[in-house]
Image (cartoon, rainbow, N blue to C red):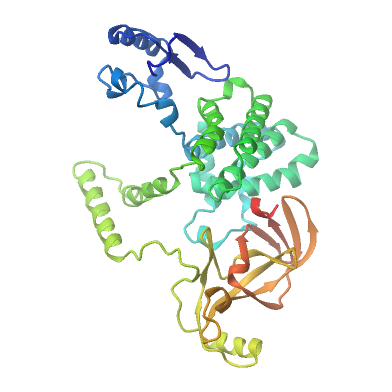
Amino acid sequence: MWSIIRHTSLYTHANCDIIYVCCGLTCNSDLDFVINIVCALYDAPRLGFSHSSGNLLLDPALNEVVDPAKHNSFDWAHCYMVNGLFNTQVGLMMSELKASKVTYSVLYEYVQLWSWPRRLSGRSATGHEAMGRKRATGSNKAGKFNAAASEGLSLFPVLAHWIRSVLLPSGAHAAACKAFLSLSEVLDLLLASARGGVSPKALETAIVQHMDDFKSAFGEENVAPKGHYVLHLPEMLHRLGFLPNTLVHERKHKTVKRFGDAVSNTGAGFDRGILEEVTCHALHAMATAPGLKLELGLQEPKDPPNTLCRTLEVVFGFNPRCTYSQTCRFSKWGTCCVGDAVFWKEDGHWRVGQVLWHINVVSACTSQVDDATLTGLTAWELRRWTAASSTWLAQANTTLIRSLAICDTCIWSLDEHAGVATVLHPIGVR
């Protein structure tokens, strides 16, 4: 709400309850009167707006200095993933799928078939349990999918693959399927925007398409205010060059919940006890944290185990002097661990394999990290390629590549009987 515009107008977006008030009144008392009336009529505090007559931003001296409309920023993580459009849409979709006897328990069994990169599975961020019985009961009761932001971001590619390969071919619930695939496209672009290469126009097209598909599938009455907020994200990307998000801040909530969730007696001393535990945890983290490990190469290298030494002697024909690690940073965007499935390019073609080990060869001839840091993996053989996924014959042969040639990790599922792996493509691989 700002008093710099020269005319007075009241505009209500057709798809939500967002109210814009633009007043050119020079008298603060008149401005207070108009804004208070609008707030009372449209319940503005519920929509995230409140008015304070003593607000510094209402000082006329700032009219030519501060423009809140341009300084405002919407957090896409909260808009979509924190009690957001994703949670709402999955809840509505699951309510509709009950007619086809598809429940959270069915999807729970399905997601158990998939493997995530260890950086996610190692901290329980894959979303497996979000489909479990206890969480499903809460989701059904609330009508929204009860999943944390990190869980939702891990689950949506798998759910999209299930819709493409199982639900969509059946011809059932076509509108709901189309809406979720549109949502998946938006989330892919939002995640990729942090690395650059996503144009505001492409994001705008995807967001508008998703909102149109959402209304077609579930009706305008289910469009929340966040459905309007996200329409501003392309302009923000154009203006800022990136989209700020609060995913890191959201993860900090887990520290408090870690100590609070296990306490049943919430009487006297509860707050102090939680505060003491969190303070001790914070002090320990500050004393022991190694800082941001953004250097390329091995993470916490050590001497290789004897079994790996024997393997390396077979691969190289001699036993090289080297260090070893289960984790390697292949770019400023990501790390991969032993057991992860990764993409890399060879002769212009995408290849996929499962990481066996990472080593750094100690030699005077290999002074640069990209030449000295090597990854051993099992290179799989391509069977079928589509835009969003591919299938590979999971072979056991060992291949050696430069670690920095790795492009990304992926989500995958292995049919152990057939020895065939299904791999979901990150947006950078499509």
Q: In this view, does 328 lie above or below 178?
A: below
Query: Is residue 233 something that shows in the picture?
Result: yes
Q: Which residue lies furthest to the bottom in this view?
A: 318
**Residue 363 horizontal/vertical position (percent):** 52, 87
The answer to whether residue 82 is seen in the rendering is no
The structure residue drawn at horizontal position 67% and vertical position 44%, both measured from the top left corner, is 160
Q: Is residue 47 shown left or right of residue 137?
A: left
> Where in the figure is residue 51, as x and y percent of width and height?
33, 18
- In this orientation, which residue lies closer to the viewer: 210 or 374? 374
Above or below residue 284? Residue 1 is above
Query: Seen in the image, is 1 located left or right of residue 312?
Result: left
User: Which residue is drawn at the image coordinates 76% and 60% (left, top)?
Assistant: 391
Q: Which residue is found at the position 65% from the left and 35% from the top?
A: 206
Q: In this view, does 312 lie above or below 394?
A: below
Among all residues in the image, which is located at the extreme front? 64
Across and down, in percent, residue 119 comes to 51, 61
Instruction: State the image coordinates of residue 199 (x, y, percent, origin top left).
Output: 61, 41
Residue at the spot 40% in from the left edge and 61% down from the top edge: 292
Tell how many labels.
0
